[in-house]
Amino acid sequence: MRIVRFTPADSAGLGSDPLFGVLNDEDQILVLRGDPIYSGIVPTSSKVALADVRLLAPTIPRSKVVCVGKNYADHAKEMDSEVPKEPVIFIKPNTSVIGPNDIIKWPRITDRVDFEGELAIVIGRICKDISSQNYKDVIYGYTIANDVTARNIQKSDGQWARAKGFDTFCPLGPWIETEFEAKDQKITTILDGELKQSEPLSSMIFKIPEIVEFVTSAMTLLPGDVILTGTPAGIGPMKEGSEVSISIEGLGTLSNKVSPRGN
């Protein structure tokens, strides 16, 4: 099931506030009542065409986005790092989240803004100390993320919070797929028409059950919170006006453009 969050066109007669819906194979959205992560699937009698809406980030994390670093061996190598013995985690604020086709804003204080395509886990309930055997119990679904990074700030700070926490530095979308299972599907990133990343999800060092267990051993996750599972090799800088598109087989494509520097 594909869960979308959107604002409808005025002509749809649904108002202008964000709504949730279920997207079918004919690109029609069945409008839901409330947030399905909290309320379950409560359909209304309204439908709207995908072409007549603006998609938003499919979830706004209630508290945080937890990210796993260096979770692909080739990426650790390209960063001149050792493969970690346990997951390396950090947090992006929920204020960094934007949706499909929203603009990534280039901060004036950095001269390099990088893309990092990732699989994202959407949490479905309050959870703490979840075992790897029970990880599916707390996952609502999956979406695509771009862990945008101000690379020179990451290097100068020596830690990652500021470099990865700027507003607009966490695009999510285009929807949540509730029936997705991460296996050998490829994650690919295309920058201005050029393929930059291509790697199967099976190359992750730490798999999803391990990630959920590790993160929840340290902190409580809330419904709508997101875990980013790491990026494969091929990361690199974007230019002003660039368009970056991240795709995962079975999850669609997340596309965003980059603003001029300082906007």
Image (tube, rainbow, N blue to C red):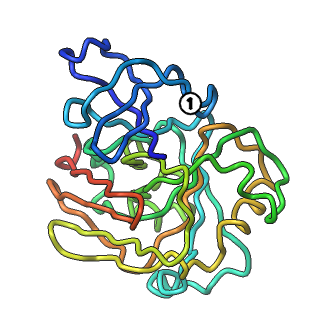
Secondary structure of residue under mark 1: loop
Residue 201 seen in this snapshot: yes
The quadrant holding residue 112 is: bottom left
Residue 105 lies left or right of residue 122; in this view the side is: left
Q: Which residue is mark 1?
A: 41
Position of residue 204 relative to residue 262, above or below, is below
Relative to 231, does residue 32 appear above or below in the rendering? above
Tell me which residue sits at (56%, 75%) in the image: 70
Give the total of numbered labels.
Answer: 1
Q: Residue 27, how many percent across, how many down?
A: 28, 42
The image shows residue 34, relative to residue 103, as above or below, that is: above
**Residue in view at x 40 percent, y 18 percent:** 45
Quadrant of the drawing holding the C terminus: top left
Image location (x, y in percent) of residue 157: 51, 61
- Tell me: residue 70, above or below residue 114: below
Q: Would you say residue 108 is visible in this rendering? A: no
> In this rendering, would 189 be left or right of 257?
right
Please, what is the three-letter code of the amino acid marked with disc 1?
A: Ile
Residue drawn at x 71%, y 56% as measured from the top left: 136
Is residue 193 or residue 93 the one in the foreground?
A: 193
Q: Say which of 181 and 82 sits in front.
A: 181
In the image, 220: left or right of 187? right
Q: Position of residue 163 (x, y in %)?
A: 45, 55
Residue located at (57% from left, 64% from top): 181
**Residue 188 sits in which quadrant?**
bottom left
The crowd level at tag 1 (other Cα within 10 Å; few <14, some 14-19, many 20+) is some
Q: Position of residue 242 (x, y in %)?
A: 17, 58
* Front in this rendered view, residue 186 or 90: 186
